């Protein structure tokens, strides 16, 4: 049952929003014609523009991220108007939350930023054998994304601050059990139905288009029968992951690495602490600093007398915006996550101990060590596979960093061929035929990368057959390609595509005939005519659709229960038409207590999400958000 709610959460969210929206003032998005200029604004937030260039860049990065995460995804979906508009909405949301964080003074402390960076998997792979960060590799990793460490860390800090805005609402949302059950009962309501289907395929035999009709359809739908621009290419890939498989490791090196890093690999000891922070502004007079110290000393005496009040005092007195609300709790952290004076004291305290005053660049801290997490020691043999994998990854990353500049220079300086780079770096030149400007269905790997395809079909690459620049197509992956043969787009002649034109025309006419017949029968049956072709009575619901197509199921569940039996007609895209007769409304299937509790909990989470969405809409109104491009029209929804 719990899985059913999760699988149908889109429906339930829509149902929730119907209940919630009247309680909030929503901001209507005003549509405008899309601008073509690269610097033209496509949206405004709090008086600041989001430009088309920003939008294009953001969508390119988002597309690349999704393809790396889901290589088998149909690439055409990511280039649809709906996908591009979703990226713009995300940009607007980030800007709105960023403005809100700034105006509400929600900032991210250095300690919180350090913990977030420490948990970043990509950064973790850059640690050297002694456990310290390879700073040069870190800078190189960010440089390939067009970032400096300062820019990257500023982005992470901004993201953490933005989360505080949204989590302030989502973290406090809840729904009473009574309200949840009313909504869930309606959502999982069952209905007894009969269905008559009018399939387009059954009408195909009666469609006999003439040559003139075929020609007219061809002329009216030329783009459907166009051969796209395409190219036969060769390309070269420099990939850190591929380098790993070629590396041989020395047993002695693996053993030495274990001896030096066993503790870190098993998992460093982590400590959990709470603190009370009284800040001292930079450059404050000595007298002001001493006043803060005196106040901190008084608080220290207070919590030492009553340690159990530490969290309460932190909530009331601590000036750390990131932890005060949670009683000063900083969660678990390992060495390197905090500034050194703070860390040294934490790792010297016994569990439950309270420190003396600790002075750092942020002010005066009172620290309480609340827990210690020590990982168990593991043997060399049990850790050997992990160590070998880590060593290969580190060595491959270093080799990639060393080879990346050579690769980029060679494909640029000797742009008439990929052979010099392939021979120098011992890489294999790959080939592909029929590559198009947009990734094709089923395209994976580098040939599904927008940036590479854009470079490949640039005028210089097409006309001069020159190598593309080295394009980053993934984490630690560079590609250069060149066009060997280019075929421009062309409209295929009618004689070449006549069969395809006829098939499309017959399919379109068959759907029209099926819908006409279905609509005629619907009116006749509503008027009292004897129905024929109805299926046996079946009980359907959102959790058990009994094989009904989604438009048919929604039509059955949306029929007015006050006038049963109800007749509903449903056009089905590319398939024809269906008539649904709704006989009876039945309550939801009885749940066990545990399943009911899970459903109510899930409902509460969705309710909190809906409240967050409503809150976001009020922020959009407050900051005068305008999206200056037309929202794409959704795919046609079958009318009832």
Image (cartoon, helix red, strand yellow):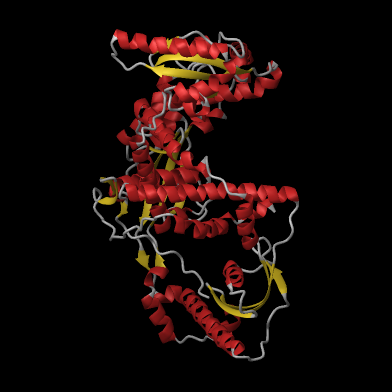
Q: Is residue 606 left or right of residue 385?
A: left
Q: Is 557 drawn above or below residue 416 in the view shown?
A: below
Count the marks: how many?
0
Q: Position of residue 533 (x, y in %)?
A: 68, 84
Closer-to-camera residue (485/128): 128
Q: Position of residue 464 (x, y in %)?
A: 29, 47
Query: Does residue 168 appear in the picture of this structure?
Result: yes
Closer-to-camera residue (165/60): 165
Closer-to-camera residue (3/573): 3
Query: Does residue 457 appear in the picture of this structure?
Result: no
Q: Position of residue 33 (x, y in %)?
A: 28, 61
Residue at figure coordinates x 50%, y 18% from the top left = 275
Classify the position of the N terminus by image quarter.
Answer: bottom right
Q: Is 67 drawn above or below residue 120 in the view shown?
A: below
Q: Is 16 drawn above or below residue 480 in the view shown?
A: below
Closer-to-camera residue (534/240): 534
* Image-quadrant location for residue 471: top left
Residue at figure coordinates x 69%, y 48% from the top left = 597
Q: Is residue 369 left or right of residue 159?
A: right
* Image-quadrant location for residue 258: top right
Residue at figure coordinates x 38%, y 49% from the top left = 618
């Amino acid at each position: 049952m719990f899985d059913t709610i999760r699988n149908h959460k889109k429906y339930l969210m829509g149902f929730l929003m119907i209940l919630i929206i009247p309680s909030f003032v929503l901001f209507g998005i005003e549509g405008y014609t899309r601008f073509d200029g690269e610097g033209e604004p496509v949206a405004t937030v709090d008086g600041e523009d989001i430009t088309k260039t920003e939008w294009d860049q953001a969508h390119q990065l988002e597309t690349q991220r999704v393809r790396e995460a889901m290589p088998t995804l149909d690439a055409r979906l990511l280039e649809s108007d709906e996908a591009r508009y979703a990226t713009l909405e995300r940009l607007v949301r980030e800007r709105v939350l960023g403005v809100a964080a700034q105006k509400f003074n929600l900032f991210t402390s250095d300690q919180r930023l350090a913990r977030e960076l420490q948990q970043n998997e990509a950064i973790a792979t850059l640690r050297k054998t002694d456990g310290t960060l390879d700073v040069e590799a870190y800078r190189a990793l960010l440089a390939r994304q067009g970032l400096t460490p300062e820019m990257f860390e500023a982005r992470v800090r901004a993201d953490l601050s933005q989360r505080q805005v949204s989590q302030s609402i989502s973290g406090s949302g809840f729904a009473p059990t009574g309200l949840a059950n009313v909504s869930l009962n309606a959502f999982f309501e069952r209905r007894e139905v009969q269905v008559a289907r009018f399939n387009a395929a059954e009408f195909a035999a009666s469609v006999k288009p003439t040559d003139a009709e075929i020609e007219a359809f061809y002329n009216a739908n030329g783009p459907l029968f166009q051969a796209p621009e395409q190219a036969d290419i060769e390309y070269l890939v420099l990939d850190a992951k591929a380098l790993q498989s070629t590396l041989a490791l020395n047993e002695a090196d693996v053993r030495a690495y274990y001896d030096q890093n066993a503790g870190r690999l098993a998992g460093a000891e982590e400590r959990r602490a709470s603190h009370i922070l009284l800040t001292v502004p930079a450059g404050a007079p000595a007298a002001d600093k001493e006043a803060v110290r005196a106040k901190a000393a008084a608080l220290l005496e207070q919590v030492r007398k009553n340690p159990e009040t530490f969290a309460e005092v932190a909530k009331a007195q601590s000036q750390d915006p990131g932890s005060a609300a949670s009683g000063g709790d900083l969660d678990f952290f390992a060495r390197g996550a905090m500034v050194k004076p703070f860390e040294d004291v934490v790792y010297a305290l016994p569990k439950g101990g309270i420190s003396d005053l600790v002075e750092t660049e942020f002010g005066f801290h009172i620290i309480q060590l609340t827990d210690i997490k020590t990982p168990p020691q593991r043997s060399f043999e049990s850790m050997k596979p992990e160590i070998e994998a880590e060593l290969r990854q580190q060595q491959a990353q270093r080799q990639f960093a060393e080879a990346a500049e050579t690769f980029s220079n060679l494909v640029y300086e000797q742009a008439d061929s990929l052979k010099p780079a392939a021979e120098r770096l011992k890489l294999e030149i790959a080939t592909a035929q029929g590559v198009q400007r947009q990734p094709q269905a089923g395209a994976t790997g580098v040939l599904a990368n927008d940036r590479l395809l854009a470079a490949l079909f640039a005028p210089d690459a097409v006309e001069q057959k020159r190598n593309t620049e080295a394009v980053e197509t993934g984490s630690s992956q560079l590609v250069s390609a060149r066009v060997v043969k280019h075929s421009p787009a062309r409209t295929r002649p009618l004689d070449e595509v006549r069969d395809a034109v006829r098939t499309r025309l017959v399919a379109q006419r068959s759907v029209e005939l099926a819908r006409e017949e279905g609509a005629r029968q619907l009116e006749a049956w509503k008027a009292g005519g004897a129905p024929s072709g109805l299926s046996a009575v079946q009980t359907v619901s959102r959790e058990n659709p009994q094989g009904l197509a989604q438009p048919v199921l929604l039509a059955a569940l949306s029929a007015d229960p006050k006038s049963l039996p109800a007749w509903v007609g449903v056009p089905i895209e590319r398939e024809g038409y269906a008539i649904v007769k709704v006989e009876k409304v039945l309550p939801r299937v009885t749940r066990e207590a545990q399943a009911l509790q899970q459903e109510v909990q899930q409902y509460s989470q969705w309710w909190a999400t809906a409240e967050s969405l409503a809150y976001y809409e009020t922020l959009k109104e407050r900051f005068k958000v305008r999206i200056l491009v037309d929202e794409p029209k959704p795919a046609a929804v079958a009318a009832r």
